[in-house]
Image (cartoon, grey):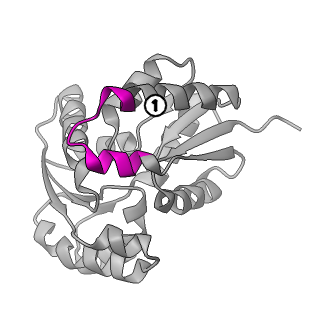
């Protein structure tokens, strides 16, 4: 029996776990996934306007731990830590994937006007910078319009996924003029059906695209 590729999933919030596990079960069930959760990452990120030096150190430490676990690749599922993920990736010999990299690349290929529905405000600045970076690499002219849906994340953390989805879907028509709408976080992928019913614009989520990209990166 061939050895299963081990992928460490680094989570900053527990609400990201189920969506990515579902994506792996559907798209790459042969992989062995290991959930590494540090919920204080998102708590501390919400307190600071910028990524602190200590946060960079923490990601390097978490990357070292994942390597000791035997990771062949690391997928970070929280979208508020882009530069810290890059620092971690420089220290490690295996592929490290940001949560939205694959989704951003797909969105840029769909047109010039891209919308994004987010539920965790501290992530928006770093995600916008990453999006613009990928636009530059692609030689494209895409622009990003973001809406932060207030109350949706709180609802999800309290276990009310239906309200979470409804709040996001209610704001989606404001981005109907876009060529594509991205659901910003792994956790917001739960709202795909509700958003898809609210607009005719193509709606993109991060988990499926991320699984496909990391599978290609390690030849799974």
Quadrant containing the N terminus is: top right
Judging by the rendered image, the residue that carries numbered circle 1 is 58
Q: Quadrant of residue 145?
A: bottom left
> Image check: 48 left or right of 102?
left
Most frequent secondary structure within the magenta stretch: helix
Start-end of magenta stretch: 41-55
Quadrant containing the C terminus is: top right
Label 1 sits on a secondary structure element that is helix
Residue 48 lies in magenta, yes or no? yes
Q: Is residue 79 visible in this depiction of the protein?
A: no
Q: Residue at x 38, y 50 (%)?
A: 42
Using the image, determine if residue 145 lies above or below residue 36.
Answer: below
Q: Residue at x 19, y 43 (%)?
A: 125
Residue 166 lies in magenta, yes or no? no
Q: Residue at x 37, y 29 (%)?
A: 54
> Image check: 132 left or right of 25?
left
Q: Quadrant of residue 65?
A: top right
Q: Residue at x 37, y 52 (%)?
A: 43
- Mark 1, other Cα within 10 Å: few <14 / some 14–19 / many ≥20: some
Residue 70: x percent and y percent? 71, 29
Residue 50: x percent and y percent? 22, 37
Residue 33: x percent and y percent? 66, 46
Residue 215: x percent and y percent? 58, 38
Q: Is residue 11 visible in this depiction of the protein?
A: yes
């Amino acid at each position: 029996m061939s050895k299963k590729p081990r992928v460490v999933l680094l989570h900053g919030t527990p609400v990201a776990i189920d969506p990515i596990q579902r994506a792996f079960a559907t798209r790459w069930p042969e992989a062995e996934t290991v959930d590494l959760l540090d919920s204080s990452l998102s708590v501390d990120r919400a307190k600071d306007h910028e990524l602190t030096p200590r946060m960079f150190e923490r990601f390097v430490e978490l990357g070292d731990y994942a390597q000791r676990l035997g990771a062949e690749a690391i997928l970070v599922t929280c979208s508020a830590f882009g530069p810290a993920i890059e620092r971690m990736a420089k220290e490690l010999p295996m592929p490290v994937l940001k949560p939205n990299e694959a989704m951003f690349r797909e969105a840029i290929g769909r047109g010039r006007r891209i919308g994004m529905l987010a539920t965790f405000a501290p992530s928006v600045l770093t995600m916008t910078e990453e999006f613009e970076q990928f636009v530059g690499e692609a030689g494209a002219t895409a622009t990003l319009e973001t809406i932060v849906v207030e109350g949706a994340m709180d609802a999800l953390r309290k276990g009310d996924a239906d309200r979470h989805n409804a709040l996001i879907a209610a704001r989606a028509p404001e981005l109907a003029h876009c060529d594509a709408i991205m659901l910003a976080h792994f956790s917001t992928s739960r709202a795909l059906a509700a958003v898809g019913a609210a607009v005719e614009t193509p709606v993109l989520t991060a988990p499926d695209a991320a699984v496909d990209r990391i599978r290609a990166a390690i030849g799974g």
